Image (cartoon, grey):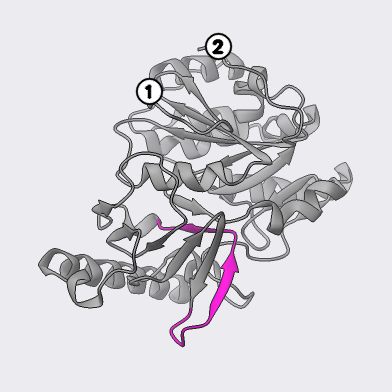
Amino acid sequence: MTVQQKPSDRPVCVIAAYFGPLPIWFPAFLLSCQYNSEISFLLVTDQQYEGLPPNVRVHGTTLAELAAKASSILSTSISFDRPYKLCDLRPLFGVLFREHLHGYAYWGHADIDVIWGDIMSFVGEEVRSGADVISARKNHTCGHFTLYRNREELNTLFTLDARYPQLLSHSSPAYYDEVGMTALLRQHSPQLGLSLAWGKWRFNTPGQGDTILGRSYVWPRVNGWRWHSGTLSHRTFLGHQQDVMYLHFMTWKTSLRRCDLSTLAETPEFWISFNSINTQPASLVHSFDGHSLIDGYRIARQNTGILLRGILR
């Protein structure tokens, strides 16, 4: 699919790849994209969607076509049994989608199980100063938000790891966007002279004290986050509100069954709970019906298990 080139006033292009039916929260995701007017978003998908914001474009393709293009670039055979393997393909995005990135200072990769706040208020200083890599995860690259300067040596960093093509030929994910690229940057950034802006957390909750596991797995909260005209705030258990760059609700994808935004519409605010996105604060009583009680228990149990395994390693 041919798309228009970017407006000159957007320094960043964020790429999100998603295959299969779009999730129920997709209109809320799009609205949060729209308010980040300094950023372009490129959605790589096999789905069609009408009424996209002006800063969101679609690159229409299939998983098989994407694998074939990556196979040609890397001179190896790549096939995807499931979309989650895309996490290993993300370091290649600067080459795979080169035709969409002309003129941008940065490209990045992200997920769509997120609601954005005001991204540039959190990374604008690093973008303006020309940091080479900007991550939302402290001391690591981050699958759901990492930016790379749009330069050949950064777009082809994966070539420094001879194992990379072989890892892509395996069906099971290696989480190379996070594990592999973190190791690669730690090893090579000193001699390459790369500046890494990954010294702090930028997602889910404010503060700097959490571990990777504690920060990444959000608990089953009701009205825990409020989006308002482009900003996203986290509500603590004591009722205090603090802005965050985005919410990544990776463990809520099966529990989030309701979204009041059925299409991209102008709405001043919405509240995010583990089972719904509402244009009015959700009732605590109605939030815990039979399904939601089971979902809440499952999420809490899953998160606890992951935390315990991380502690015992």
Q: How far apart are marks 2 and 1 (CA)?
A: 14 Å
- Numbered tag placed on residue 2 in the rendering: 2
Relative image position of residue 261 (x, y in whole percent): 33, 47
On screen, residue 89 versus residue 287, left or right, reads: right
Is residue 98 visible in the rendered image? The answer is yes
In terms of image quadrants, where is residue 97? top right
Residue 112, visible in the rendered structure: no
In the image, residue 121 above or below residue 100: below
Mark 2 or mark 1: name the one nearer the start of the chain.
Answer: 2
Image quadrant where residue 108 sits: top right
Q: Please give the name of the residue rendered at 35% of the width and 59% of the height, measured from the top-left corner.
A: 279
Three-letter code for the amino acid on which mark 2 is drawn: Thr
Kindly identify the amino acid type of the residue bearing the numbered disc 1: Asp
Q: Residues within 10 Å of mark 1 (few under 14, many from 20)?
A: some
In percent of width and height, residue 252 lies at: 32, 58
Residue visible at 50% across and 71% down in the picture: 234
- Please give the label number shown on residue 163: none
Near mark 2 (Cα within 10 A), the count class, few <14, some 14-19 or many ≥20, is few
Closer-to-camera residue (118/17): 118
The spot of residue 120 in percent (x, y) is 69, 52
Q: Does the magenta stretch include residue 40?
A: no
Residue 246 is a magenta residue: yes
In the rendered view, would you say 221 is above or below 139? below
Q: What stretch is highlighted in magenta?
A: 236-249
Is 112 placed left or right of 165 in the picture?
A: left
- Residue at x 35% of width, y 74% of height: 304
User: Which residue is the site of mark 1?
Assistant: 46
For this view, does 302 lie left or right of residue 4?
Answer: left
45 or 76, which lies in front? Answer: 45
